[in-house]
Image (spheres, rainbow, N blue to C red):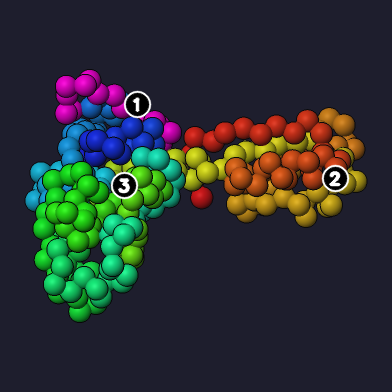
Amino acid sequence: MQLRLGLPKGSLQKATFDMLKRAGYQCSVSSRSYYPAIDDPEIEAVLMRAQEIPRYVAAGALDVGLSGLDWLIESDADVVQVCDLVYSKASRASARWVLAVAQRSEISSPKDLNGKRIATEVVNVTKKYLAGRGIEAEVEFSWGATEVKVPDLADAIVELTETGASLAANDLRVLDTVLETNTKLIANHKSWEDASKRSKIETLSVLLQGALMGQEKVGLKMNVPRAQLDKLLELLPALRQPTISALTNQDWVAVETVLDEREARDLIPQLRQAGAEGIVEYPLNKVIP
């Protein structure tokens, strides 16, 4: 059994390869190749545009792939959505397709786009958005550099953004969010029904989700006076309960836990004040709940 896996080429490629590495897969590719080497003989990886992956997964050319919700909707692909993987090229957050116009435009709401022209890469997504709001506008496909098309070539655009910096740099104003999107692990229906392939896909799903969770969390361990343990445990968050181990000195215990990385900075001084010593914070490759 070999699983044919479609990986997104382009803006998401580096973030995807980093996630695979944290999940335990060594994956590399030369600049001119579309076939990454991966250290799992049961997986064959192929690089292609994220826009195309849902179509090839639905057709069975790929067993499984990584692509965005936006491209699933755009292609209307009939696939199994195995899990959400919320990451992007610049952050750990979802991205948004937004409806935007020039700052100086007289258009102040989506309703003002009746009879107007909109340029975008996601024509079907945009048409569904407009239809849901009773707006009749011309939607044309944009091959790229979409931001420069308003106001001379189009009245508005629907464009993907993570931070909004590119829109602001091009003097654009956001009217509305058309779609919030994130990467999904998707599978072909026939492959999903195959017991051996499904088992492999589910393993891949668990490891990739664990890699993303591990990126957000850290491990924390410390030595605590037994007399101060109850007070200290009131401060500590944990996935379930902290691990408490006896030390050779019976008056002390070792405490270990997992918490959100952003919590550690503020928590560590409180732990010291509560009597903890030898506090160690360490990164995690993956966390499997």
**Which residue corresponds to the image point at 39% horizontal and 46% vertical from the top-left?**
165
Q: At numbered mark 1, what does the secondary structure look like: helix, strand or loop?
A: loop
Horizontal side of residue 29 vs 277, given as left or right:
left
For residue 23: magenta?
yes
Location of residue 126 (image quadrant): bottom left
Q: From the image, state whether disc 3 or disc 1 is nearer to you.
A: 3
Q: Nearer the viewer, mark 2 or mark 1?
A: 2
Residue at the disc numbered 3: 170
Relative to 285, does residue 242 appear above or below in the rendering? Answer: below
Which residues fall within the magenta stretch? 20-35
User: Which residue occupies the foreground of this view, 73 or 218?
Assistant: 73
Which residue is pictured at 15% across the width and 68% down the height? 116
Q: Residue 243 in the image: x percent, y percent?
A: 69, 44
Q: Amino acid at mark 2?
A: Ala
Label 2 residue SS: loop
Q: Is residue 260 at least partly visible in the picture?
A: yes
What residue would you read off at disc 2?
274
Describe residue 272's horizontal placement relative to residue 29 as left or right: right
* Disc on res. 121: none
The kind of residue on which mark 1 rests is Gln
**Residue picked out by circle 1:** 26
Residue 3 appears at what percent x and percent y? Answer: 21, 39
Residue 73 occupies which quadrant of the picture?
bottom left
